[in-house]
Amino acid sequence: MTQDELKQAVAKAALDYIKPHIDEHTVIGIGTGSTANYFIDYLAEIKAEVNATVASSEASAQRLKQHGIPVFDLNSVDEISFYIDGADESNHQLQLIKGGGAALTREKIVAACAKEFVCIADESKLVDTLGSFPLPVEVIPMARSHVARELVKLGGDPVYRQGVSTDNGNIILDVYNFAIADALAVESAINQITGVVTNGLFAQRPADILLLATQNGVKQLHC
Ligand SMILES: O=C(CO)[C@H](O)[C@H](O)COP(=O)(O)O
């Protein structure tokens, strides 16, 4: 199977995973990216059963609405039952790097509100140590140079993601060459820098389950 076929397979597996639990009170959090897009398209097949979703980006909200799936503001729902989203990397503790699609802050907020975070990924995303994928950091625009200098002091190599403005009107610095041995410590240290909105490490709030598409089928990993 190609990587795209693996993404499709794991999106379908996520729908199969949550479908038996969907009732009129279920609120589904929806991530961002190509794997999440496949999930949205599968969810459309059962849209009559879906009363509420919350999207982690304007792009996902638009795709949901195009399918006629109801999208709510996060402040108007009590609790998110499941949050379904992809990742750029996951380690075996289900700590993640996210934000390749620049939606990390809203993704982190939706994940924080979710009872169960179901991460969906193809097998190329599973790593022993996080950090081969450059770590995205969302930054208030006027703080760009200051934050970049502080990231260098932490040992990283920040690169401005040209031409990208997040849904929150901020910029992204992608940090290369970060050895992330202790993801919790790195997540927290970067978030202490003035001007940082948040970073793409999901260690304080890792996934609860990773559905991993492999050439031998979709596997379930728990931490
Ligand atoms: O964090 C994300 C967006 O901000 C995505 O989940 C991540 O980039 C994976 O994307 P894809 O499913 O396209 O491989």
Image (cartoon, rainbow, N blue to C red):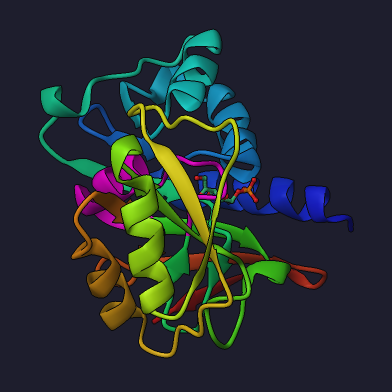
On screen, 54 above or below 207? above
In the rendered structure, does residue 142 fall within the stretch colored magenta? no
**Residue 208 seen by the camera:** no
Q: What residue lies at 31% left-to-right and 50% top-to-bottom?
A: 108
The one nearer the camera, 54 or 25, is 54
Q: Find residue 144 and report its horizontal and vertical position in percent.
A: 37, 47
Screen quadrant of the N terminus: bottom right
Tell me the residue at 56%/40% (across/down): 36
Q: What residue do we see at 56% from left, 49% from top?
A: 100
Q: Please say if 207 is above or below 181.
A: above
Query: 175 or 133, which is in the foreground?
Result: 175
In x, y percent, where is residue 208? Answer: 35, 67
Q: Quadrant of residue 120?
A: bottom right
Task: Provide residue 50's location: percent of width, then percent of height.
Answer: 38, 24
Where, by quadrant of the figure, is residue 42 drawn?
A: top right
Is 6 on the left or on the right of 185, as rendered? right
Residue shown at the point (43%, 90%) measured from the top left: 181
Find the magenta span and give its range: 98-117
The quadrant the C terminus occupies is bottom left
- Horizontal side, residue 139 vs residue 38: left or right: left
Residue 101 is inside the magenta segment: yes
Q: Nearer the viewer, residue 160 or 63?
A: 160
Residue 5 rendering spot, x and y as whole percentages? 81, 49
Observer-nearest residue: 123 or 95? 95
Asked whether residue 90 is in view, the answer is yes
Instruction: Report whether 177 appears left or right of 7.
Output: left
Q: Is residue 159 above or below residue 177?
A: above
